[in-house]
Image: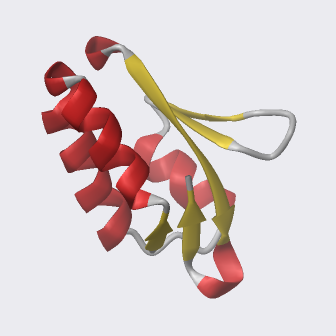
Amino acid sequence: MNLIGANKLSEYGEKHPKALPAIEALHAFIAQANWTTREDIERDCGSIACFRNDGWLEIDLKDRGCCVMLAIHYGVGVARI
């Protein structure tokens, strides 16, 4: 997936060094993902992800004190923060 807004992850990681390793790992994970359906996301990250009623995907990194909100555009392979 192409990740739009990845700089927001970097900025957050700089301000919150405790979260940086998890954020970097999440960025790498999303970049290699090939999600074409909601079920793909549920399969790959069901334990840390949930879809909100407004259509956003929330990936919860509780152990690092943050969550990442994504809008997924399956047809073009884009995840937007």
Tell me if residue 61 can be seen: no
Residue 69, percent from left and from top: 58, 40
Where 50 sits versus 32, above or below?
Answer: above
- For the N terminus, the quadrant is bottom left
Residue at horizontal 55%, vertical 64%? 79
Count of picture labels: 0
- Which picture quadrant has residue 64? top left
Tell me if residue 29 can be seen: yes
Residue 11, percent from left and from top: 32, 42
The way the protein has been coloured in the rendering is secondary structure
Where 51 sits versus 34, above or below?
Answer: above
- Which picture quadrant has residue 23? top left
Pick the residue in front: 61 or 20.
20
Pick the residue in front: 66 or 13.
13
73 displayed left or right of 15:
right
Residue 81, percent from left and from top: 56, 52
